[in-house]
Amino acid sequence: MPTPLLEMRNISKRFGHIQALKDVSLTVNPREVVALVGDNGAGKSTLIKILTGVYKKDSGEIYWKGKKVEISSPLDAKALGIEVVHQYGALIDGMNVVENFFLGREIVKSYGPIKLLDEKKMIEICSKVLKELGLNIDSMKRDVATLSGGERQGIAIGRCIYFGGELIVLDEPTTFLSIKETEKVLTYIKNAKRMGKSVIVVSHIIRDIYPIADRFVILHKGRKIADLQSGEITREGLETAIVSGRLP
Protein backbone atom coordinates (compact mmCIF):
# COMPACT_ATOMS: atom_id res chain seq x y z
CA MET A 1 0.00 0.00 0.00
CA PRO A 2 1.33 3.47 -0.86
CA THR A 3 1.95 5.94 1.94
CA PRO A 4 -1.13 8.15 2.38
CA LEU A 5 -0.74 11.73 1.28
CA LEU A 6 -2.59 12.92 4.37
CA GLU A 7 -3.55 11.35 7.68
CA MET A 8 -5.48 13.17 10.39
CA ARG A 9 -5.61 10.92 13.45
CA ASN A 10 -8.08 11.26 16.33
CA ILE A 11 -8.68 14.98 15.90
CA SER A 12 -10.75 16.64 18.62
CA LYS A 13 -11.89 20.24 18.97
CA ARG A 14 -14.10 21.94 21.53
CA PHE A 15 -15.58 25.43 21.51
CA GLY A 16 -16.64 26.15 25.08
CA HIS A 17 -19.32 23.63 25.97
CA ILE A 18 -19.67 22.46 22.36
CA GLN A 19 -17.72 19.38 21.28
CA ALA A 20 -17.25 20.18 17.58
CA LEU A 21 -15.07 17.13 16.83
CA LYS A 22 -14.38 13.98 18.82
CA ASP A 23 -11.57 11.61 17.75
CA VAL A 24 -12.12 12.11 14.02
CA SER A 25 -9.66 10.52 11.61
CA LEU A 26 -9.32 11.22 7.91
CA THR A 27 -6.99 9.67 5.32
CA VAL A 28 -6.41 10.83 1.76
CA ASN A 29 -4.34 8.75 -0.64
CA PRO A 30 -2.47 9.95 -3.73
CA ARG A 31 -4.72 10.63 -6.73
CA GLU A 32 -7.89 10.13 -4.70
CA VAL A 33 -11.14 12.10 -4.46
CA VAL A 34 -12.54 11.92 -0.93
CA ALA A 35 -15.99 13.31 -0.20
CA LEU A 36 -16.27 14.66 3.34
CA VAL A 37 -20.01 14.66 3.92
CA GLY A 38 -22.46 15.43 6.69
CA ASP A 39 -25.35 17.68 7.58
CA ASN A 40 -24.96 21.21 8.91
CA GLY A 41 -23.17 21.07 12.25
CA ALA A 42 -21.54 17.71 11.52
CA GLY A 43 -18.03 19.13 11.94
CA LYS A 44 -16.91 19.22 8.30
CA SER A 45 -15.84 22.86 8.29
CA THR A 46 -14.10 22.56 11.66
CA LEU A 47 -12.02 19.60 10.46
CA ILE A 48 -11.03 21.42 7.28
CA LYS A 49 -10.13 24.59 9.20
CA ILE A 50 -7.83 22.51 11.40
CA LEU A 51 -6.26 20.95 8.31
CA THR A 52 -5.66 24.35 6.75
CA GLY A 53 -4.33 26.06 9.89
CA VAL A 54 -7.30 28.30 10.61
CA TYR A 55 -8.14 26.48 13.88
CA LYS A 56 -5.78 24.79 16.32
CA LYS A 57 -6.73 21.23 17.24
CA ASP A 58 -7.17 20.33 20.91
CA SER A 59 -5.74 16.85 20.39
CA GLY A 60 -4.78 14.45 17.65
CA GLU A 61 -2.02 14.22 15.06
CA ILE A 62 -1.55 15.17 11.41
CA TYR A 63 0.78 13.33 9.05
CA TRP A 64 1.79 14.53 5.58
CA LYS A 65 3.40 11.89 3.34
CA GLY A 66 4.06 9.80 6.42
CA LYS A 67 5.74 12.56 8.42
CA LYS A 68 4.13 14.15 11.46
CA VAL A 69 3.53 17.86 10.93
CA GLU A 70 2.11 20.83 12.79
CA ILE A 71 -0.12 23.15 10.77
CA SER A 72 -0.40 26.39 12.71
CA SER A 73 -1.44 28.73 9.92
CA PRO A 74 -2.76 28.75 6.35
CA LEU A 75 0.79 29.49 5.23
CA ASP A 76 1.95 26.23 6.82
CA ALA A 77 -0.73 24.36 4.87
CA LYS A 78 0.22 26.05 1.60
CA ALA A 79 3.90 25.28 2.16
CA LEU A 80 3.05 21.58 2.39
CA GLY A 81 0.94 21.67 -0.77
CA ILE A 82 -2.57 21.96 0.69
CA GLU A 83 -4.72 24.48 -1.17
CA VAL A 84 -8.31 25.50 -0.46
CA VAL A 85 -10.94 26.67 -2.93
CA HIS A 86 -13.90 28.33 -1.27
CA GLN A 87 -17.32 28.89 -2.84
CA TYR A 88 -17.04 30.95 -6.03
CA GLY A 89 -13.26 30.48 -6.01
CA ALA A 90 -12.46 33.69 -4.09
CA LEU A 91 -11.68 35.64 -7.26
CA ILE A 92 -11.58 39.42 -7.45
CA ASP A 93 -14.12 41.11 -9.72
CA GLY A 94 -12.67 43.94 -11.77
CA MET A 95 -9.56 41.89 -12.48
CA ASN A 96 -9.17 39.62 -15.47
CA VAL A 97 -8.55 35.87 -15.61
CA VAL A 98 -4.76 35.95 -15.80
CA GLU A 99 -4.52 38.65 -13.09
CA ASN A 100 -6.56 36.48 -10.73
CA PHE A 101 -4.62 33.34 -11.68
CA PHE A 102 -1.25 34.90 -10.80
CA LEU A 103 -2.43 37.25 -8.03
CA GLY A 104 0.49 37.79 -5.65
CA ARG A 105 2.67 35.41 -7.67
CA GLU A 106 3.21 37.35 -10.88
CA ILE A 107 6.00 36.45 -13.29
CA VAL A 108 8.42 39.29 -14.01
CA LYS A 109 11.24 39.80 -16.46
CA SER A 110 14.21 42.00 -15.75
CA TYR A 111 15.90 44.61 -17.91
CA GLY A 112 18.81 45.57 -15.70
CA PRO A 113 17.30 47.24 -12.63
CA ILE A 114 13.88 47.45 -14.27
CA LYS A 115 11.36 44.68 -13.67
CA LEU A 116 8.24 44.30 -15.79
CA LEU A 117 5.39 41.83 -15.72
CA ASP A 118 5.85 39.05 -18.25
CA GLU A 119 2.25 39.18 -19.41
CA LYS A 120 2.80 36.99 -22.47
CA LYS A 121 4.26 34.12 -20.43
CA MET A 122 1.52 34.40 -17.79
CA ILE A 123 -1.19 34.25 -20.45
CA GLU A 124 0.43 31.20 -22.07
CA ILE A 125 0.68 29.34 -18.75
CA CYS A 126 -2.82 30.28 -17.61
CA SER A 127 -4.37 29.25 -20.91
CA LYS A 128 -2.51 25.90 -20.97
CA VAL A 129 -3.42 24.94 -17.39
CA LEU A 130 -7.09 25.86 -17.78
CA LYS A 131 -7.42 23.98 -21.07
CA GLU A 132 -5.84 20.88 -19.54
CA LEU A 133 -8.36 21.16 -16.72
CA GLY A 134 -11.16 21.29 -19.27
CA LEU A 135 -11.98 24.99 -19.03
CA ASN A 136 -12.15 26.98 -22.25
CA ILE A 137 -12.34 30.75 -21.90
CA ASP A 138 -12.19 32.94 -25.00
CA SER A 139 -9.70 35.42 -23.51
CA MET A 140 -7.39 35.39 -20.51
CA LYS A 141 -8.00 39.14 -20.29
CA ARG A 142 -11.71 38.71 -19.68
CA ASP A 143 -13.02 40.21 -16.42
CA VAL A 144 -13.89 37.36 -14.06
CA ALA A 145 -17.10 39.20 -13.11
CA THR A 146 -18.47 38.13 -16.50
CA LEU A 147 -17.80 34.43 -15.88
CA SER A 148 -20.16 31.81 -14.48
CA GLY A 149 -19.79 30.30 -11.03
CA GLY A 150 -18.47 27.07 -12.50
CA GLU A 151 -15.86 28.89 -14.58
CA ARG A 152 -14.71 30.83 -11.52
CA GLN A 153 -14.28 27.56 -9.63
CA GLY A 154 -12.24 26.21 -12.54
CA ILE A 155 -9.85 29.15 -12.47
CA ALA A 156 -9.35 28.76 -8.72
CA ILE A 157 -8.70 25.02 -9.08
CA GLY A 158 -6.26 25.61 -11.94
CA ARG A 159 -4.41 28.19 -9.86
CA CYS A 160 -4.05 25.68 -7.01
CA ILE A 161 -2.70 23.02 -9.35
CA TYR A 162 -0.16 25.27 -11.03
CA PHE A 163 1.22 26.65 -7.78
CA GLY A 164 2.02 23.27 -6.30
CA GLY A 165 -1.20 22.13 -4.69
CA GLU A 166 -0.98 18.37 -4.15
CA LEU A 167 -4.16 18.25 -2.08
CA ILE A 168 -6.99 20.53 -3.16
CA VAL A 169 -9.81 21.12 -0.70
CA LEU A 170 -13.08 22.23 -2.27
CA ASP A 171 -15.53 23.72 0.22
CA GLU A 172 -19.13 23.22 -0.99
CA PRO A 173 -18.08 23.78 -4.64
CA THR A 174 -21.51 23.21 -6.22
CA THR A 175 -23.71 25.19 -3.84
CA PHE A 176 -25.92 27.64 -5.75
CA LEU A 177 -24.69 26.36 -9.15
CA SER A 178 -27.00 25.27 -11.94
CA ILE A 179 -26.97 21.66 -13.13
CA LYS A 180 -24.87 22.63 -16.15
CA GLU A 181 -22.35 24.56 -14.05
CA THR A 182 -22.19 21.74 -11.51
CA GLU A 183 -21.28 19.32 -14.30
CA LYS A 184 -18.39 21.62 -15.27
CA VAL A 185 -17.02 21.65 -11.72
CA LEU A 186 -17.27 17.86 -11.47
CA THR A 187 -15.29 17.62 -14.70
CA TYR A 188 -12.60 19.88 -13.26
CA ILE A 189 -12.37 17.61 -10.20
CA LYS A 190 -12.00 14.48 -12.33
CA ASN A 191 -9.36 16.19 -14.45
CA ALA A 192 -7.46 17.36 -11.37
CA LYS A 193 -7.23 13.71 -10.28
CA ARG A 194 -6.09 12.75 -13.78
CA MET A 195 -3.36 15.39 -13.44
CA GLY A 196 -2.08 13.60 -10.33
CA LYS A 197 -3.78 15.60 -7.60
CA SER A 198 -5.80 14.49 -4.59
CA VAL A 199 -9.05 16.24 -3.74
CA ILE A 200 -11.23 16.59 -0.65
CA VAL A 201 -14.74 17.69 -1.56
CA VAL A 202 -16.70 19.06 1.39
CA SER A 203 -20.38 18.86 0.58
CA HIS A 204 -23.89 18.09 1.77
CA ILE A 205 -25.27 17.82 -1.79
CA ILE A 206 -24.92 14.10 -2.34
CA ARG A 207 -26.42 13.97 -5.84
CA ASP A 208 -23.55 16.17 -7.05
CA ILE A 209 -20.54 14.46 -5.54
CA TYR A 210 -21.67 10.84 -5.43
CA PRO A 211 -20.64 10.04 -9.05
CA ILE A 212 -17.08 11.37 -8.75
CA ALA A 213 -15.92 10.40 -5.24
CA ASP A 214 -13.63 7.42 -4.67
CA ARG A 215 -14.48 7.33 -0.98
CA PHE A 216 -16.97 8.85 1.46
CA VAL A 217 -16.14 9.96 5.00
CA ILE A 218 -19.37 10.63 6.90
CA LEU A 219 -19.49 12.93 9.93
CA HIS A 220 -22.44 13.28 12.29
CA LYS A 221 -22.49 15.65 15.26
CA GLY A 222 -18.71 15.84 15.42
CA ARG A 223 -17.98 12.13 15.08
CA LYS A 224 -17.01 9.95 12.14
CA ILE A 225 -19.63 7.29 11.61
CA ALA A 226 -18.27 5.70 8.43
CA ASP A 227 -15.42 5.63 5.90
CA LEU A 228 -16.60 3.78 2.79
CA GLN A 229 -15.41 3.11 -0.74
CA SER A 230 -17.78 4.41 -3.40
CA GLY A 231 -19.10 0.94 -4.22
CA GLU A 232 -19.92 0.13 -0.60
CA ILE A 233 -22.96 2.40 -0.24
CA THR A 234 -25.71 3.68 -2.49
CA ARG A 235 -26.55 7.34 -2.89
CA GLU A 236 -29.79 6.77 -1.01
CA GLY A 237 -27.94 4.96 1.77
CA LEU A 238 -25.45 7.79 2.03
CA GLU A 239 -28.23 10.36 2.35
CA THR A 240 -29.91 8.25 5.03
CA ALA A 241 -26.68 7.95 7.01
CA ILE A 242 -26.09 11.69 6.89
CA VAL A 243 -29.54 12.44 8.30
CA SER A 244 -29.84 9.61 10.82
CA GLY A 245 -26.25 9.31 11.98
CA ARG A 246 -26.07 5.57 11.31
CA LEU A 247 -25.59 3.32 8.32
CA PRO A 248 -28.72 1.82 6.74
Image (spheres, grey):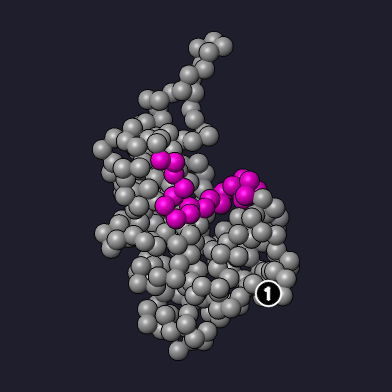
Percent x, y for residue 148? 31, 49
Can residue 111 be seen here? The reply is yes
Q: Is residue 135 left or right of residue 247?
A: left
Q: Is residue 226 above or below residue 35?
A: below
Write the residue at 50% across / 57% down: 169
- Dot 1: what SS? strand
- Asked whether 71 or 204 is in front, the reply is 204
Tell me the quarter of the image containing the N terminus: bottom right
- Asked whether 162 or 30 is in front, the reply is 162
Write the residue at 29% across / 35% down: 139
Tell me the quarter of the image containing the C terminus: bottom left
Percent x, y for residue 73? 66, 50
Write the residue at 35% across / 52% down: 149
Tell whether position 8 is magenta: no
* Callout 1 amino acid: Ile
Percent x, y for residue 132? 34, 45
Can residue 3 be seen here? The reply is no
For mark 1, what is the residue? Answer: 18
Q: Which residues are magenta?
A: 74-93
Q: Quadrant of residue 143?
A: top left
Q: Is residue 145 left or right of residue 6?
A: left
Percent x, y for residue 227? 52, 76
Tell whether position 90 is magenta: yes
